[in-house]
Image (spheres, grey):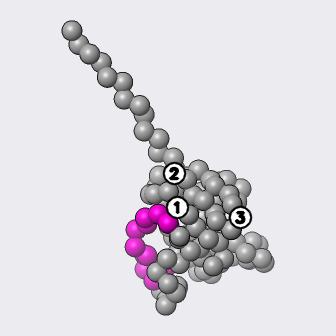
Amino acid sequence: MITLTTKLKKSTMLKVRFEKENRTIEVETGENLREAAIRNKFSIYPHITKILNCRGRGLCTACTVQVLSGKLDPRNETETDKLGKKPDDFRMACQVTVTDDLVVRTNP
Ligand code: FES
């Protein structure tokens, strides 16, 4: 007799919590953090940069967040260049690929 095992489909959705705003969004594994925020109608930009930002081109640093928990790949060249001597947990949301549940602080 053959026994069939049903495997539960593993969810590929991750959670990103924005600490200051106490808001959690669902993010697909591998999704860009800025784009995921936009898809969830959440603005990562402070003040006037809600309008005046580089739209994810890695030029303005207005999308900088502090990653309080969760694992990310190391900074890419753009982040290394633009964030300079800022702490290692400061990341540019437009350059971050989400592969883990995260807790982040906007406008650190
Ligand atoms: S949106 Fe301008 S650097 Fe990320």
Q: Does residue 50 appear to the left or right of 106 in the view shown?
A: right
Q: Nearer the viewer, residue 25 or 30?
A: 25
Q: Residues within 10 Å of mark 3 (few under 14, many from 20)?
A: few
Residue underneath mark 3:
21
Residue that badge 1 annotates: 102
Q: Is residue 103 above or below residue 48?
A: above
Secondary element under disc 1, as helix, strand or loop, is: strand
Tag 3–tag 1 contact (CB < 8 Å): no
Give the position of the N terminus as an image quadrant.
Answer: top left
- Residue appearing at x 62%, y 71% in the figure: 105
Residue 35 in the image: state x and y as whole percent: 60, 60
Q: Earlier in the sequence, mark 1 or mark 2?
A: 2
Residue at the farthest bottom position: 85
Identify the disc placed on residue 14: 2
> Is 74 included in the stretch rendered in magenta?
yes
Q: Secondary structure at mark 2?
A: strand
Label 1 amino acid?
Answer: Leu
Q: Are marks 2 and 3 in contact (CB under 8 Å)?
A: no
Q: Residue type at mark 2?
A: Leu
Q: Which residues are magenta?
A: 69-80
Q: Earlier in the sequence, mark 3 or mark 1?
A: 3
Counting from the top left corner in percent of width and height, residue 68 is at 53, 70
Quarter residue 62 falls in: bottom right
Specify whether residue 108 is painted magenta.
no
Q: Is residue 9 left or right of residue 107?
A: left
Tell me if residue 38 can be seen: no
Query: Outermost residue toward the left?
Result: 1
